[in-house]
Image (tube, rainbow, N blue to C red):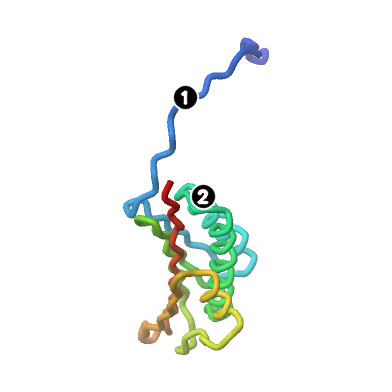
Amino acid sequence: MGAQRYPRNYGEVKVADRQSPPLDAHDDIELRLGADLVHLPIVRSVVATIATRADFDLDAIADLRLAVDEACSTLITRAIPGSTMRCLFTVSDDELTFTGTVHSDSDSSPSTKSFGWRVLTTLTDSVDSRVTSNGQAGHQIDIELTKRRVVVDA
């Protein structure tokens, strides 16, 4: 059998005039990955892509990358070894909300006096953490942050 030959066409390439659909609340994106620091680049890339598609400016995208990195780092250091981290990204109106969740043996919330928390409050419009008991399975720790898109009237 010989290799298949395809006709060579070095002519003009036509691109359809089609735009990507906007991200709305029904387009929530959920990511589950091992609660390990080696996965931080994946989460940073995902939030940057979502923010770009949601028409955030470059400064806001950089802020979101850093804030989500800090939130995930905080969660991962509290997670039960070998467990999963859940990341939920929600775009609605003019804001992007990130919620990170891990299971932990600790029942304490991340410190709001730490440098990491200061980073989160500086880079986002709102940030909150919650700890809920899962009975004998330990505790669930959530960090939720929101960044609003700057809307410039033309």
Residue closest to the far front: 154
Q: Position of residue 126 (x, y in %)?
A: 44, 73
The circle on residue 16 is 1
Task: Tell me which amino acid carries mark 1.
Answer: Ala
Kindly identify the residue that appears in the image at 57 percent across and 64 percent down: 63
The circle on residue 134 is none
Are the residues tagged 1 and 2 within 8 Å (C-beta)? no
Kindly identify the residue that appears in the image at 43 percent across and 60 percent down: 96
- Relative side of 100 to 7, left or right: left
Kindly identify the residue that appears in the image at 42 percent across and 83 percent down: 139
Q: Position of residue 34 (x, y in %)?
A: 55, 66
Of the pair 105 and 12, the residue shown nearer to us: 12
Asked if residue 50 is positioned above or below residue 20 in the image, the reply reads below
Tell me the element at label 2: helix
N-terminal label among 1 and 2: 1
Q: Quadrant of residue 48?
A: bottom right
Kindly identify the residue that appears in the image at 41 percent across and 50 percent down: 153
Label 2 Cα neighbours within 10 Å, binned few <14 / some 14-19 / many ≥20: some
Of the pair 14 and 106, the residue shown nearer to us: 14
Q: Which residue is mark 2?
A: 52
Q: Position of residue 29 (x, y in %)?
A: 42, 55
- Relative side of 45 to 128, left or right: right
Alpha-carbon span between mark 1 and mark 2:
21 Å
Label 1 Cα neighbours within 10 Å, binned few <14 / some 14-19 / many ≥20: few
